[in-house]
Image: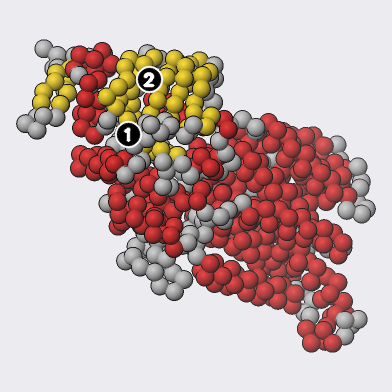
């Protein structure tokens, strides 16, 4: 059994001194796809930020690839861990390809001149997410969904071992939601480990191996998505009544019970 | 700006969708260098006293030679240095503060420099390099204060501290002005308006060294600046040591602006307009924008200064070059504000 990609022990995360989530113990094996579910403000993004080293853990331990988070050099970490942030609010004057090439930065020399390999990887990432046509377009002229797809492509171009996706399906139409998770899924089959913050339990059930449920600052449950995701538990997670159904193919579907 | 949507495929030195390539950079920077040389050439022959270049070059001791080597060339070099420093640091600060309309004076450097120079002029230090030296010290002190106070996680903290410091310095300057005799007041006002004088070679060499150092650091950091323009957290997730890079860029930009302000006073709009116009043409990549702004700023200020000399017969005095840059820059700025940042 290989070392876990990410391991946390008694981790507390948050801003300032108030923990948003505490007593978090996780062990994520290589080659798995996890979802993190929970109501707004339950600390999902805060957890990802902490794992990225953008926020200091309030207490507890984080180990990445067997090494304590605090001992990672930024650049070395960026070669192993990539992040798809929730929103893009940077300089929107770059083109799609320029933005995706920035994912190559941790692999390049200090001045970031792309070599043939960098260009090939960036173009392949654009094609993988289905946005090759955005290569020459300026980001400021793109829709929220198109920007989102470029951020996913950039993270894939980073060639990480661990991919952290913060609501990768936000702003995306149904087809693109499924497409993005499908592409991540096939990367995971080839050895990538991914953690995706999602808001749709149906997507979590359809695409992920394991799920972490966060509510009220603590872990409501974690484990295989197939066992964990059921109407009663999800109802407690979101604080509303949920109905569960199965498709002909056996996939579980969840929907809020209409208030009478 | 032309559309960059083209079919994929690589031709000689051109990569569709990528605007920074070594070949394009060489072409753009070569062209801008030529522009600077033309501006310098125009500046040394234009003026109230027409210089005959042939006579000046064949006999440096002739009146033409003395005007050319003693006055025109040093002043053109001074203009180029000041313009380069203001425009290139303006470009870097616009990326760092993620505000395309940021100005090189936002970090409090102008307030500090003006305060330093005002104190020097007020106490009558008109001898060797009094105002420039005091301005430089004032600018660096302001920078240290702003960097110290702006240590918080957001780049806006530095920006806000700078703005507040500028207002504070302006109040002290007003206070000093009320205590001055009319002659001294005139000197202070002329300096504050931004003007190019006649600096000794030693001062010019020192100014050149400051700009080479400041702009060199900015260019060296320009790829990381690109990543920082995406946001601190994204830059960090792409491997940029955010705090170190930000401090280094702020320091280099402040050094360069302090060097420029010390030599010429507060010349406005160069650091705002030049990088912004070049950005429309070249895109936001700082690896190209920093050196292009340095060259563009140099050409712009040298030409603006030549214009002040052409205006001598009109006003029977030379208006400060800051007045010319403001006349050109103000309307341009309004025009830029009123158009979409990224045209089709």
Q: Whole-percent x and y of residue B248?
A: 67, 45
**Residue B113 in which image quadrant:** top right
Q: Is residue B316 visible?
A: no
Q: Is residue B141 left or right of residue B302?
A: right
- Residue at position x 86%, y 72% in the image: B70
Identify the residue position indicated by label 2 in the image. Answer: A42
x, y percent for residue B93? 60, 47
Secondary structure, mark 1, is loop
Between residue B318 and residue B74, name the one nearer to us.
B74
Question: Mark 2 or 1, which is nearer the eye?
Answer: 1
Chain letter behind tag 1: A
- Label for residue A32? 1
Image quarter where the N terminus of chain B lies is: bottom left
| Coordinates of residue B11 in the picture (x, y in percent) | 40, 72
Image quadrant where residue A98 sits: bottom left
Between B140 and A26, the one nearer to me in the picture: A26
Callout 2 environment at 10 Å: few (<14), some (14 to 19), or many (20+)? some
Q: Residue at x 39, y 65 (%)?
A: B16
Which residue appears farthest toward the left when viewing the image? A248
> Tag 2's secondary structure?
loop
The residue drawn where x is 80% and y is 47% is B136
Mark identifier at residue A193:
none
User: Which corner quadrant holds the C terminus of chain B?
Assistant: bottom left
């Amino acid at each position: 059994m290989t070392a876990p990609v990410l391991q946390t022990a008694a981790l507390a995360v948050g801003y300032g001194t108030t923990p948003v989530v505490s007593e978090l113990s996780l062990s994520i094996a290589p080659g798995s796809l996890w979802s993190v579910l929970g109501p707004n403000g339950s600390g999902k993004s805060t957890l990802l930020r902490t794992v990225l080293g953008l926020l200091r853990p309030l207490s507890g331990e984080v180990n990445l690839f067997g090494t304590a988070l605090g001992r990672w050099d930024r650049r070395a970490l960026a070669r192993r861990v990539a992040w798809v942030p929730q929103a893009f609010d940077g300089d929107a004057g770059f083109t799609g390809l320029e933005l995706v090439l920035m994912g190559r930065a941790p692999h390049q020399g200090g001045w970031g001149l792309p070599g043939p390999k960098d260009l090939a990887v960036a173009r392949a990432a654009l094609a993988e997410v289905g946005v090759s046509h955005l290569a020459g377009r300026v980001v400021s002229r793109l829709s929220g969904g198109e920007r989102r797809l470029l951020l996913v492509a950039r993270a894939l171009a980073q060639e990480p071992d661990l991919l952290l996706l913060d609501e990768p399906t936000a702003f995306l139409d149904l087809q693109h939601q499924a497409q993005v998770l499908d592409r991540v899924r096939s990367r995971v089959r080839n050895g990538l480990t991914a953690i995706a913050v999602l808001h749709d339990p149906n997507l979590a059930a359809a695409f992920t191996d394991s799920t972490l449920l966060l509510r009220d600052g603590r872990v409501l449950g974690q484990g295989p998505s197939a066992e964990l995701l059921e109407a009663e538990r999800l109802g407690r997670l979101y604080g509303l009544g949920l109905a569960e159904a199965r498709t002909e193919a056996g996939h579980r579907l969840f929907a809020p019970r209409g208030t009478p | 700006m032309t559309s960059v949507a083209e079919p994929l495929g690589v031709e000689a030195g051109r990569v569709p969708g990528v605007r920074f390539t070594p070949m394009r950079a060489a072409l753009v920077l070569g062209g801008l260098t030529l522009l600077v040389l033309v501006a310098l050439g125009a500046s040394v022959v234009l003026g109230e006293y027409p210089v005959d270049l042939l006579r000046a070059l064949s006999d440096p001791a002739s009146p033409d030679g003395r005007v050319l080597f003693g006055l025109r060339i040093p002043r053109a070099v001074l203009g180029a240095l000041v313009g380069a420093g203001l425009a290139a640091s303006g470009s870097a600060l616009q990326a760092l503060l993620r505000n395309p309309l940021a100005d090189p004076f936002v970090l409090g450097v102008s307030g500090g420099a003006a305060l330093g120079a005002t104190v020097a002029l007020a106490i009558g230090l008109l001898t060797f390099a009094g105002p420039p030296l005091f301005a430089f010290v004032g600018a660096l002190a302001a920078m240290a204060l702003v960097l110290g106070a702006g240590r918080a996680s957001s780049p806006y903290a530095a920006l806000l501290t700078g703005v507040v410091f500028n207002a504070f310095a302006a109040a002290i300057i007003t206070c000093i002005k009320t205590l001055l005799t009319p002659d001294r007041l005139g000197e202070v006002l002329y300096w504050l308006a931004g003007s190019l004088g006649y600096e000794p070679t030693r001062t010019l060499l020192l100014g050149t060294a400051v700009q080479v150092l400041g702009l060199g650091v900015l260019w060296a950091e320009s790829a990381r600046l690109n990543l920082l323009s995406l946001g601190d957290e994204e830059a960090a997730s792409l491997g940029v040591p955010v705090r170190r890079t930000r401090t280094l860029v702020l320091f280099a930009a402040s050094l360069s602006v302090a060097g420029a302000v010390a030599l010429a006073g507060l010349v406005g709009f160069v650091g705002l307009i030049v990088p912004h116009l070049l950005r429309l043409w070249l895109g936001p990549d700082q690896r190209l924008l920093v050196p292009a702004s340095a060259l563009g700023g140099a050409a712009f200020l040298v030409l603006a200064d030549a214009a002040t000399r052409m205006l001598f017969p009109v006003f029977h005095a030379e208006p400060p070059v800051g007045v010319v840059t403001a006349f050109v820059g103000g309307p341009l700025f309004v025009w830029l504000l009123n158009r979409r940042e990224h045209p089709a």
